[in-house]
Image: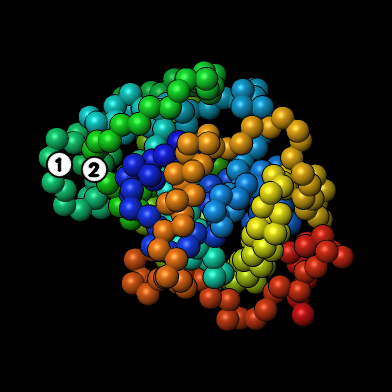
Amino acid sequence: MEPAIQAILMAHPEPSPRPVDIVACGSTIGNLLRFIRGDERPFRMLLEVVGDAVHLIRRENSPKETMSDVRGYGHKFPEAYTTWDSEVRGSTSHQRIIQYDFGGLRCLVRHEGDGYLQHKQGSSTNDTRTTFVENVSVDSLIENLKVKETAPGSPQDQSQQVQLKSGGFEVPQCAVFDLKTRSVKRKGSDFLGEELPRLWAAQIPNFILAYHDRGTFKDIEVMDVVQEVKAWETSKNPELSRLAALLSHIVRLARAQRNDRLELSRQHLDRLEIRNQCPGLSSAFSSEVNDEWAMWLAGDDTQDGPSTDGEDGLQWSDGEGDYTACSESCSYCGKCTY
């Protein structure tokens, strides 16, 4: 979490013009949405309050834990079909921070982007960037291409000190894509439908689906999925309203116990548990970053309420009804209605 916050402070040093309620990532928002939808998947996350912003911090069993016996072609596909711009060559991932209003809450959400489509990048004063491979025809890209099957690499050493470097140019969210690879034998399955909740949480408008036949990619679909994401949002109004109610409750609870560092977990299908963190867990932020971030979040507290400029992405209204009937008696199950 700290590198993301440091990136915000460097890229936008001016204080926040509006109060921030939630700082999260696509994973933590996705976990809460899966709970609301009844999908069976346990999870844990830490709750930490800086200023008035509640941070939902992903927590795994171990930062060095890997998935065994997972093999496929997805890890090598981007290396063959995409290029890193010169300023960021040598990077291992591209992390983005977006902001939007959801259920009356101002949210900052970090997510990973697989790449961007150059024709949606728009004009830029930087002409040194490398050519994105989408400018080349798909036929020429896939000709005689064979991607070797590989397993995910081992995690890198996390003990290295974070170094910040400014460079390159900003890529608009409208150009970002998510990439998935699947066997051609499974063509016809609704792979996009499976990914729509995640695309919605991260507001990713483009989806690339590449089918392979034993590692040879000959069928690549590049899709603009803005309308599909909007349609999914409309169809899931009751679930998203309950998600908004759950997030509001988490914010109120965390702020009320701001001196206590909490952990939220789902070990059972039908309920969430919130408890104090285990002793000895370090804070998500160093004291220096914590103080600087708190000052940034304090911002201009004379402005409040949702933005009216329409440039911040998702604006949410749950006009279809009130789905906030949950209470402690149901462990805030996310399914109660009046």
Question: Which of pointers 1 and 2 lies earlier in the amino acid sequence?
Answer: 1
Q: Secondary structure at mark 2?
A: loop
For mark 1, does the 10 Å Cα neighbourhood hold few (<14), some (14 to 19), or many (20 or more) residues? Answer: few
- Amino acid at pointer 1: Asn
Q: Are marks 1 and 2 in contact (CB under 8 Å)?
A: yes
- Residue drawn at x 40%, y 63% is 300
Res 198 seen here: no
Q: Quadrant of residue 179?
A: top left
Q: Is residue 111 left or right of residue 280?
A: left
- Relative to the observer, which residue lies in front, 38 or 169? 169
Q: Position of residue 173 (x, y in %)?
A: 35, 53
- Relative to the observer, which residue lies in front, 41 or 253? 253
Q: Which quadrant holds the C terminus?
A: bottom right
Q: Quadrant of residue 146?
A: top left
- Amino acid at pointer 2: Phe
Residue carrying label 1: 126
Q: Secondary structure at mark 1?
A: loop
- Residue drawn at x 41%, y 58% is 299
Res 21 seen here: yes
Is 181 above or below relative to 92?
below
- Relative to the observer, which residue lies in front, 322 or 45? 45
Is 138 above or below relative to 200?
above
Residue carrying label 2: 169
- Residue drawn at x 74%, y 40% is 277
- Relative to the observer, which residue lies in front, 35 or 195? 35
Is 287 above or below relative to 28?
above
